[in-house]
Amino acid sequence: MTQDVEQNAQQDVKQAPFPAAITIERRVEWSDTDAAGHYHFSAVQRWAEAAEAALLRRLGLAELFGRIPRVHFEADYRERLWFGDVVRTELRVLRIGGSSLHYAFEVHGPTGLAASGRMSVVHAAPQAKGAEPWPAPVRRALAEAGPQRPEVLA
């Protein structure tokens, strides 16, 4: 009997949904660099937000644009990236609160991990004075959609 319970538990784990995630590729553009010739720190935020936009489009949640202001962004910079380098940004839903959404991201370049961090947003109507709870279908999509088809350079 214990073996049956264990097997059922293992099957449940295998079938458990995963939070939404996506990988995108971009090229370091000239406007992404600074006077030192490598990427400017702000490029990482743009790449994380580009990954978020791709994820929301893939999930059919484009209506969230304009309703999810940023409340926190942090990044650790590990390697320099140079003009023309291809960068791969991996973004995943880390946690969904009542009205908050927390992402984790990694930016990889030709030599490996270049930056990593977290970004948090809240759900709020454009003219609202505060945050609003996530609608159930949105919460479900973000919590259970799993990895989405990557957006890669041709």
Image (cartoon, rainbow, N blue to C red):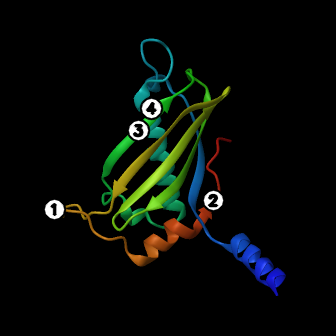
Q: What residue sits 56% from the left and 40% below the top?
A: 106
Query: Residue 154 in the image: x percent, y percent?
Result: 68, 41
- Circle nearer the viewer, 3 or 4: 3
Q: How packed is label 4: few (under 14 Cα within 10 Å), some, or many (20 or more)?
A: some
The quarter in which the N terminus is drawn is bottom right
Q: Position of residue 144 (x, y in %)?
A: 56, 69
Separation of residues labelled 4 and 2 (CA atoms)? 24 Å
Residue under label 2, please give it. 147
Residue at numbered disc 1: 129
* Structural distance between the alpha carbons of marks 2 and 1: 33 Å
- Residue 126's x, y, as percent? 23, 61
What's the residue type where badge 3 is placed?
A: Glu
Choose mark 3 or mark 1, whichever is in front.
3
Q: What separation in Å lies between label 3 and label 4 (alpha carbons)?
A: 13 Å
The earlier-in-sequence mark between 2 and 1 is: 1
Which disc, if any, is residue 74? 3
Q: Residues within 10 Å of mark 2 (few under 14, many from 20)?
A: some
Residue with the mark numbered 4: 43
Give residue 36's mark.
Answer: none
Mark 1 residue element: loop
Q: Amino acid at mark 1?
A: Lys
Which of the marked residues, 2 or 3, is nearer the chain's N terminus? 3
